[in-house]
Image (spheres, coloured by chain):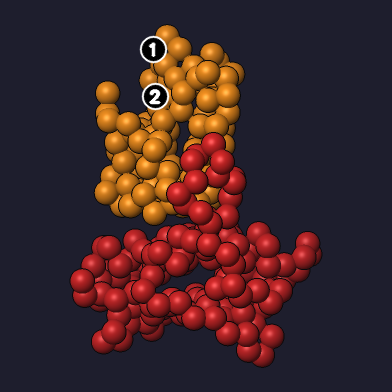
Amino acid sequence: MDIKKIVTGNTHELLVAGRIDGPGANQLEEEILASIRNGGQNVYVNLSQASFLCSAGLRVLLQYWRQMKQKQGLLQATSPTPEIDAVLTTSGFRDMLVEKR
Amino acid sequence: METVTLSSAHDKPRLDETLLSFARTHQLPPRAVQAIDLALEEHLTNVFNYGFEPGGHPQVVVRIDQDPDGLTVEISDNGKPFNPLEHPEPDVNLPLVQRPIGGLGIHLIRKSVDQLAYRHEAGRNILTLCKRLAN
């Protein structure tokens, strides 16, 4: 899995390409944590090139969505593929989606 | 039929490759393969993370087959007896702030496949997943 980061001020967009499986979820968590440490207040996880999302990835998204909300920040998942959108919907995480900016 | 034996989560890429190869050979619809892929990922994560004491020796056997009804995958392991079908369903309608972290793996397995069956036999947990190939 590959993650590219685009930083604009305190907005960090993480472009995830590949499988967010167990190891991928750990990698995603590390990148989210790095963004938070580096002052990211708005973190967008762009899923347009992610080919797979499992519960380990959902857990990371929920955990840091909640943490950012507590800090008056924001974490959102954006632009999911249809397959990933189905997983987000099945798990009840659709609230996290925003339109691609 | 294809059979893959795994002794740790590190063996998972070999299973992924076998599933993809089986799918290409049998020209399976991507939707069905993605569903089985997700169910396998979730179940095997649970088996390797929770099914064995430290120092245990996992032996997990995955059999992939196709019949007129669809794609059937049987996963058997020598771990602690555990029936995932008895696991309670999460409340996916709770607001995100109230959702517990975790507990979604078995829910995603249930929603991914069309039939799910469990038995415990000869010291092994055996989970059978079926995914229909026709809409």
State left or right for residue B19 relative to residue B133: right
Query: Looking at numbered disc 2 in the image, what kind of residue is underneath it?
Result: Glu
Nearer-the-camera pick, A7 or B92: B92
Per the image, the residue denoted by label 1 is: A8
Q: Which corner quadrant holds the N terminus of chain A? A: top left
Return the disc, 2 or 1, that comes first in the chain's sequence.
1
Q: Label the red chain with its letter.
A: B
State left or right for residue B74 relative to residue B87: left
Label 1 crowd bin: few (<14), some (14–19), many (20+), radius 10 Å: few
Which chain letter matches label 2?
A
Q: Label the orange chain with its letter.
A: A
Q: In this view, does A13 lie above or below B123?
A: above
State left or right for residue B77 relative to residue B74: right
* Separation of marks 2 and 1 at Cα, in angstroms: 8 Å
Query: Looking at numbered disc 1 in the image, what kind of residue is underneath it?
Result: Thr
Q: CB of mark 2 within 8 Å of CB of mark 1?
A: yes
Q: Is mark 1 on a helix, strand or loop?
A: strand
Tell me where residue B28 sits by quadrant: bottom left
Q: Which residue is drawn at 29% across and 36% down?
A: A79
Q: Which corner quadrant holds the C terminus of chain A? A: top left
Q: Residue at x 29, y 84 (%)?
A: B69
Label 2 crowd bin: few (<14), some (14–19), many (20+), radius 10 Å: many
Which chain letter matches label 1?
A
Tell me where residue B51 sits by quadrant: bottom right
Q: What element carries label 2?
A: strand
Marks 2/1 same chain: yes
Q: Is residue A24 above or below residue B57?
A: above
Per the image, the residue denoted by label 2 is: A13
Q: Where is residue A64 in the image (x, y as percent from the top left)?
A: 54, 32
Q: Position of residue A18 (x, y in %)?
A: 38, 44
Q: Which residue is drawn at 69% across and 85% down?
A: B123
